[in-house]
Structures are given as structure tokens and as C-alpha cells.
Amino acid sequence: MSHIVIAVVDDMFFASKIRAVAEAVGTEISFPRSKEALMQKVRETKPRLVIVDLHNQKIDPNELAQELTGIRLLGFFSHVQTELQRNAIAAGFDQVIPRSVFARDLPKILAADDAD
């Protein structure tokens, strides 16, 4: 697997935070803006991880999980919307964590040597 991570995040604050941490830990990060661009990037790069903001308005996270089998998927959500968590787990996400935990653990999540 490569050290490439794809982030399906349309919140500019989180995107900039993810980009800064990825640069700091030596991980290449990509932010596709559409489902078509995402699927193309997945085919081209075979990422080690796809991070998905479960609140994303442009791409349906649960539909995405069903299409991206065989790729590690991590979803994050606002801790008050536990239904998003349940739905994502049922759809096939490997890990679903609250946004606060995601922000706290981002360096570890993105670390280039964190292949699992």
C-alpha cells in the first residue's frame, strides 16, 4: 500500500488542518471534490486510507462505503449525531470516531508508517 490518504471533507477548516498534519508527518493527501474524482483517485493511487466526514453534503458516505470495499475507511462525525455513526458502521466503515477524537488523533491517523 502507498502512503497516500484521500480525504472526503468539504469543511475547509478540517481540510486545512488535515493538510497541515499530513505535511508534518510525511503523508501525501488528496481532497477530491466529487465522487467521480474520488473514484478516479482511488483507482490511480490505491490509497492506504480514505477519511470521510460523515456530514459531507456532496458525497453520500454510506453509498461510498459500499463501493470502496477493500480500502480502509475511517469516518468521523459530530458526537451528538450517533445515528451517523451507526449507519456508517452498518455500511462498512472500518472505523467511525467522533470529530473531537479525530482531531486529537490526527497525527497518529495520518502517520506515514501507520499502515494498519
Image (tube, rainbow, N blue to C red):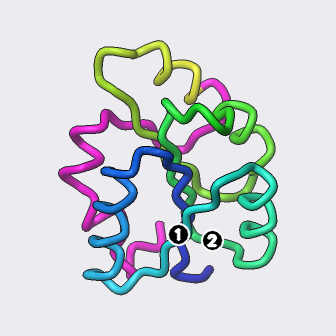
Q: Magenta span has 109?
A: yes
Q: In this view, does 107 lie to the left or right of 4?
A: left
In three-dimensional space, the C-alpha distance between marks 2 and 1, rounded to whole angstroms, equals: 5 Å
| On screen, residue 71 above or below 43 | above
Residue found at x 55% / y 70%: 30
Report the disc number at residue 47. Answer: 2
Q: Would you identify the image quadrant in which residue 67 lies? A: top right
Q: Classify 111 as above or below 75.
A: below
Q: Sort mark 1 into few (<14), some (14-19) or many (20+) by Cα contacts within 10 Å.
A: many
> So how many labels did they put on this image?
2
**Contact (Cβ within 8 Å) of mark 2 with mark 1:** yes
Q: The residue tagged with tag 1: helix, strand or loop? A: strand
Q: What element carries label 2?
A: loop
Q: In this view, does 90 lie above or below 72?
A: above
Q: Please state the extent of the stretch shown in magenta in the rendering.
A: 90-116
The quadrant in which the N terminus is found is bottom right
**Residue 88 in the image, given as x and y percentages of width and height:** 57, 28
Q: Position of residue 77 (x, y in %)?
A: 39, 31
Q: Is residue 88 left or right of residue 14?
A: right
Q: Which of marks 2 and 1 is nearer the N terminus?
A: 1
| Amino acid at pointer 2 | Pro
Residue furthest to the front: 12
Residue placed furthest toward the left: 104
Report the disc number at residue 18.
none
**Depth order, front residue of 12/25:** 12
Amino acid type of the residue tagged 1 in the rendering: Val
- Left/right placement of residue 45 relative to residue 78 reads right
Residue 52 placed where, x, y %?
52, 46
Circle number at residue 5: 1
